[in-house]
Amino acid sequence: MKALKSIRISPPLAALLLAIGLFLLGGILRPGFVSYNQAINIVRLAAFLGIIAAGQTLVILSGNAGIDLSVGAVVTLGAILVFRHVDGQNSRVIPALGVALAVGSGIGFVNGLGITFLGIPPLVMTLGMAGVVQGLILVVTQGQMMGDPAPIMSRLISEPLIFDIPGVVIIWLILGGLMWLLLHRTRYGKQLFAIGVNRKTSRFSGVRVPLMVLATYTLSGLLAALGGFMVLGFTGSVFLNLGDRYLFPSIAAVVIGGTVLAGGSGSYYGTMSGALVLTLITSLLTAVQLPEAARLIVLGAILLVLLTIYGRQRRLRQ
Amino acid sequence: MNDIRLKRLSLRHPYLFALFLLITALGVNLYVQPNLFSQRVLSGNMRIFLPLMFLSAGQAIVVVGGGIDLSMGAMVSMVNAILVTLITRESGTSDIVTGILAALGAGMVAGLANGLSVAYVRLQPIVTTYATSFIFSGIALWILPRPGGLLPSGMTELYRATPLGLPLALWIALLIGLVWVGARRTRYARFLFAVGGEPESAYATGVPVSLMRLSTYVIAGLLSSLSALALTLNTGTGDPRIGEAMTLTSIVAVVLGGTRLSGGQGGIIGTLMGVVVLGTIRNIISFANVPTWWQTLVDALIIVGALAGPGLIRLIRGGSEEA
């Protein structure tokens, strides 16, 4: 029994193997699905989810029922802010990105304030903020989507950059490296895992828990806004619920990647494989051209199977 | 001294802050809409509140038991689709009874699927019920690909009835509250609070933890069906996506009502107040002539403010925060 347990592969690796398996399955179901271009296309789609799920990973790692339900709305707001400020001019991209990131961080910071100092549960605090952000979007835009993305954005984000690889994938890989450094080579990372496991003991050992939580939700807002910038570079246009479809997948990607929802254990490379798996499943279901009803049912069933494979919690009698 | 008494009072009656919110919200609503308590307005409001009351009551039971159910809105959509498919304009009594029984059964089966996954396969409630919500939404779309269907007018008229001068929906809401007050004295409720608060010690003292968890999801499924029934009686028609937005609102109502998401505490009385508060805020915004584009923002800001209330009070009084 013990030997059996020790050869269990880690969730991130399992997710990656699953992604490759799904890709090959796609080739069987749909000849022509397996190709370099299709692979690039799927990784590109996964990159957007992966970037948005980066903040979610940090928040979930921080424990205490940490979750960020405002990322969808912040993605939309980030995209809309860039859309309006850039107004088709390459020279305005950097300042517009700055504005979006600042606003995203601000929203995350407010989330952090409510959670640490007012004791509002993360789920409802971030849900409430999602409503506020949606309200802000309506007030700012009055339903009119004025603006234009800059040509350089789609050039750098969605079009092939090096070896036919789109910029967003390269940015995602760089982000992956940065996240690894942040989680495993900095004091922030060490303390994040610590507060995820147990807030009380980490406070006694000198971790400034409120500061950590504030920083984590701020980072989540920042990364969601960055995700909005990226998504805009891909879609080239904005609409009122642009980011909503990334919200729950961002949580699912984290969980499929082996990060425990209770916090304190997990990784960003797990989330990256989780994002790949989710994107592959969705692409596959689109490729086999099922009607929407069947697609939803199959997607739900696959998610359940995935969770059963490695999302199980320990028994009470242990 | 005073501080400790306040703390104890709020622990024993978690809905105290909700009661304060309720009175404030109703007061403001009455000010901007003087005929709020006229039979017609009261009946209209209650018909709108009741579906969310059923749904939030179910959510509250799951939350008290230490879980959460993100599939409740999808269950509402599914049951709504079933109802308008089985019951048509021309349906007789037996068809209507069959339709309603099928609807209640479908919700309970859906809840059973959630409960088995969470309690026995031991999956995390948030992601599990998120996954099953896809299945239920898919079934709703499969049964009813596009909005449509029409209930017999007798049924929708019944929902508008005002027995003994009060709207039927209000009587039903009171009944939900009464059932909860009665149920609180039972062994089931004691087990429920134990399972949500301290699952390990509950298990050690012989409480059937898994069975209790399973039961909360089945009850939530049944209440989702009742929510869908009330919703369908109110609209008289079907829409395969009608419940989508209700899931997260039900969680907000539960929290506004003083139930902690960590489980083991709270209940349905506060939750019902939470639903009325949410609905009343909407009323106030539309009657206070808030410009259309500002309504969502104002609504959300008030809700966040209400959520922040208990924490703000604690902060101002200098109480220690929970780590």
Image (cartoon, rainbow, N blue to C red):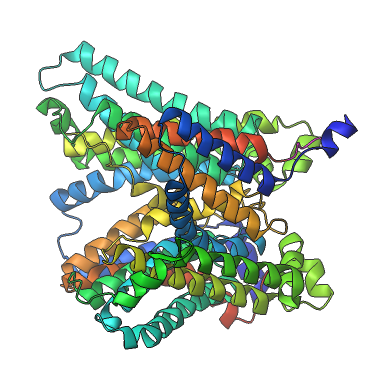
Residue for point 67% across, 49% down: A12
Q: Looking at this view, is A19 or B7 the one in front?
A: A19
Q: Looking at this view, is B195 or B22 the one in front?
A: B195
Q: Looking at this view, is B225 or A60 the one in front?
A: A60
Q: Looking at this rendering, what residue extends furthest in the top direction?
A: B94
Residue for point 28% across, 67% down: A236
Q: Quadrant of residue B139?
A: top left
> Magenta stretch mostly in which secondary structure?
loop
| Magenta stretch holds residue A315 | yes
| Magenta stretch holds residue B122 | no
Position above or below: B179 against B40:
above
Q: Can you give x and y, in whole percent of width and height, for residue B115 in the image?
A: 56, 31
Q: Is residue A93 left or right of residue B270?
A: left
Q: Which residues are magenta?
A: A314-318
Residue for point 13% across, 49% down: B40
Position above or below: A257 against A106:
above
Q: Does residue A125 appear anywhere in the picture?
A: yes
Quarter of the picture holding the N terminus of chain A = top right
